[in-house]
Image: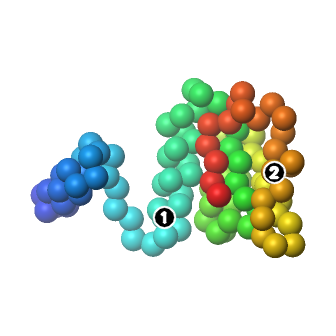
């Protein structure tokens, strides 16, 4: 990578109080969603393999969750919404907190 990229990562990290290795730049929003959902789930899989996403999320979020479910043996709850687009929280499994490690709303 270009040294300007690394300098930019260092500057942004300093501004937000993060480590430079935790700063990632993406081009489209779909790429950012993939990195966020899959990266968070995989980095924390030792805490549990249950992911909850809203059923009306962007396709990139839904597809990332489906990938985790299909290929990496994650449990995914696609949380339905009511006629107003509000989450139907009663659809969350009662024991989800013991396995949950990632949610996207």
Residue sitting at x 26%, y 43%: 19
User: Badge 1 is on which residue?
Assistant: 31
Residue 65 in the figure: left or right of residue 3: right
Examine the image and state in which quarter residue 49 appears.
top right
Lower sequence index among marks 1 and 2: 1
In the depicted structure, whether residue 54 falls above or below residue 51: below
Res 89 label: 2
Q: In the picture, which quadrant includes the N terminus?
A: bottom left
| In the foreground, 17 or 4 | 17
Mark 1, other Cα within 10 Å: few <14 / some 14–19 / many ≥20? few
Mark 2, secondary structure of its residue: helix
Marks 1 and 2 sit apart, C-alpha to C-alpha, by 28 Å
Mark 2, other Cα within 10 Å: few <14 / some 14–19 / many ≥20? few
Is there any visible trace of residue 73 in the rendered image? no
Is there any visible trace of residue 41 in the rendered image? yes
Residue sitting at x 61%, y 65%: 60
Give residue 47's position: percent from left, percent from top: 59, 28
Mark 1, secondary structure of its residue: helix
């Amino acid at each position: 990578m270009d040294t300007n990229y690394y300098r930019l990562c260092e500057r942004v990290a300093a501004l937000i109080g993060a480590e430079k290795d935790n700063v990632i730049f993406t081009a489209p929003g779909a790429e950012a969603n993939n990195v966020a959902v899959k990266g968070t789930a995989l980095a924390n899989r030792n805490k549990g393999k249950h992911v909850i996403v809203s059923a009306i999320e962007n396709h990139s979020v839904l597809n990332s969750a489906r990938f985790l479910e299909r290929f990496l043996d994650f449990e995914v709850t696609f949380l339905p919404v009511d006629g107003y687009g509000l989450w139907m929280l009663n659809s969350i499994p009662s024991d989800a907190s013991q396995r949950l490690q990632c949610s996207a709303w």
